[in-house]
Amino acid sequence: MRTKENILKALVYEQAAYYNYRKFAEEAKKEGLSETSVLFQALAGQEMDHKQQLLGQLKMIVSKELTRGRKPAGEGKRTLSPRSPGSVSPRSPERLPPD
């Protein structure tokens, strides 16, 4: 689902922007620019609000997927358990396929 992927990417950008604005606020404060520091703190807060909104949308999408009986994207990928036939144990090189 492309929209869900886009939300996940946007979450990464929002988080990065949040930390950048916080860092900028600290630097402005150290330089005696308190008004600028407050501005950067406000911008950081807005980024956190955006993040919360995106998380809400992501939860809604996952909930709809579960309601429809679909597994959320990324879940249900086939993995081999230690008891699966053909599984490879790190201690048993004899079970590795030949080159």
Image: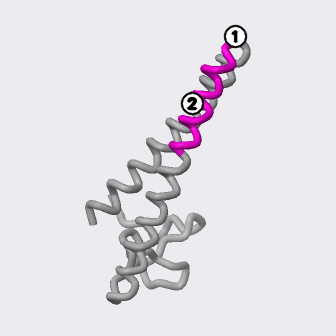
Residue 39 drawn above or below residue 78: above
> Which residue is located at x 47 percent, y 65 percent?
56
Q: Residue at x 37, y 66 (%)?
A: 97
Instruction: State whether the magenta stretch is mostly helix, strand or loop.
Output: helix
Give the residue number, with chain letter if any, for mark 1: 31
Q: Amino acid at mark 1?
A: Glu
Residue 21's image quarter? top right
Q: What range of the chain is rendered magenta?
A: 32-47
Q: In the image, 19: left or right of 54? A: right
Residue 62 part of the magenta-drawn span? no
| 3, above or below 89, in the image | above
Q: What amino acid is at disc 2?
A: Tyr
On whether residue 46 falls in the magenta region, the answer is: yes
Residue 94 lies, in percent from the top left, at: 48, 68
**Residue topped by disc 2:** 21
Above or below: residue 32 compared with residue 95: above
- The crowd level at tag 1 (other Cα within 10 Å; few <14, some 14-19, many 20+) is few
Report the front residue among 71 and 28.
Answer: 28
**Residue at horizontal 34 percent and vertical 58 percent from the top:** 5
Quarter containing the C terminus: bottom left
User: Is residue 60 or residue 81 the one in the foreground?
Assistant: 60
Between residues 51 and 71, which one lies in front from this camera angle?
Answer: 51
Badge 1 marks a residue whose secondary structure is: loop
Picture quarter containing residue 62?
bottom left
Q: Does residue 76 appear left or right of residue 1 in this picture? A: right
Indicate which disc residue 1 carries: none
- The Cα atoms of the two marked residues, 1 and 2, are separated by 15 Å
